[in-house]
Amino acid sequence: MSHRDASTNLYAINFTCNDDLDDSEIVDSLIDHVTLSPTIQLLSIVAECPVTKLPQLSLCHSLTTLRLDDIATEATGFEFVSLQCFHLFDCRFECGSGDTLDLFRGCITLQDLCMQDCVYYGRVKRFKISAPHLVHLSVSGMRVDEEFDSDCIIELFTPKLQTFTYSDSHVYKFSVKVNLSLLQKVNIVLDYLTTDMDANLSLRLFELFEVVGSAKSVFLSPVVIKVLSMFPNLMKGRPSPFSRVTIFKLITDGPLYSYLIPTNVMTYLFGGSPEMRRWNLNSHKRM
């Protein structure tokens, strides 16, 4: 970095460490450089190593997009005030001894948040996502101490949320602190049925549907439908969670005839959405 032409502005850095390098020192040195730059808007770091200076990026007020892959760091809260897009992949966070974690409370302009296969170490029982301007949220493969913790609740304070994606083999409990009235699209994917699957999974799906019940477009994986159909008595008498759905699609690349959705499942999901006129089993074409 010290040999680049200082007369030209630098707006984006994509950095990937090789396995034979001392990754930690290089990444921290890179962060030092970004902190001093008044023009860098995008930073991408792929490095399987501990990173100690990540909070220092809060001093870079030009940074709007941050992507981190494979890093490990201590974190109880980020203060990236200019950040609009934050993507985390396979990251590991030491979160202290508190039972409440609110990592993004200082990211006051955040609009796009993706968390995929990240692990949070600590006694986390309440995972808060406080982002008043968040529009897009994706949560996939989240783990606490490398395990699925059924006692952990994900709390959303995201009044401007428009798209929500959840993908896992388990379902966390969700709660909302504001009305998600702007929600347009939800994607809920269960990858497969676990050997310890029981009725609690279906109950947590019910709770999740109620949280995102204002969505207009709903995309579900076949495993979601299968879980609902396995416990019909739990659906009986339960009000439909969705009231505004106009489009439903099953997320699958398989042939249409392979997937027959039981009538009671369809009635539970969309009986409260009078405007839904058609739904499609193919994730790529509309009927």
Image (cartoon, rainbow, N blue to C red):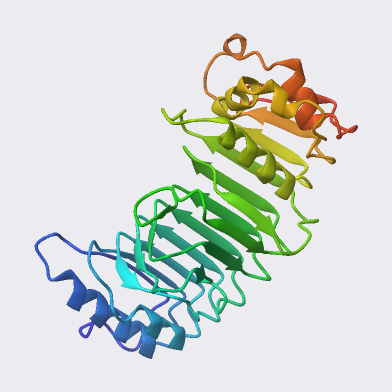
Q: Where's the C terminus, which quadrant?
A: top right
Q: Farthest residue toward the right?
A: 274
Out of 17 and 231, give the one closest to the viewer: 231
Q: Residue furthest left?
A: 20
Find residue 83 and report its horizontal and vertical position in percent.
53, 74
Q: Residue 60 sits in which quadrant?
A: bottom left
Q: Residue at x 78, y 39 (%)?
A: 241
**Residue 205 position (above or below residue 158):** above
Q: Image point 80% across, 24% down: which residue?
A: 267
- Eyeballing the image, is 31 above or below 66? below
Find residue 253 and report its horizontal and vertical position in percent. 52, 23
Residue 280 visible (yes or no) = no
* Residue at 81% over, 35% down: 240
Q: Judge whether residue 101 can be spotted in this image.
A: yes
Task: Report the front residue among 72 and 8.
Answer: 72
**Foreground: 84 or 131?**
131
Q: Quadrant of residue 155?
A: bottom right
At 35% from the left edge and 55% from the top edge, which residue is drawn? 90
* Side (left or right) of 221 relative to 263: left
Q: Is residue 232 left or right of residue 125?
A: right
Quadrant (top left/top right/bottom left/bottom right) for the N terminus:
bottom left
Viewer-nearest residue: 257 or 123: 123
How many numbered discs? 0
Image coordinates of residue 158 in percent, x first then y, are 68, 64
- Residue 255 is situated, as x and y percent measured from the top left of the image, at 56, 13
Left or right: 156 as drawn, with respect to 210: left
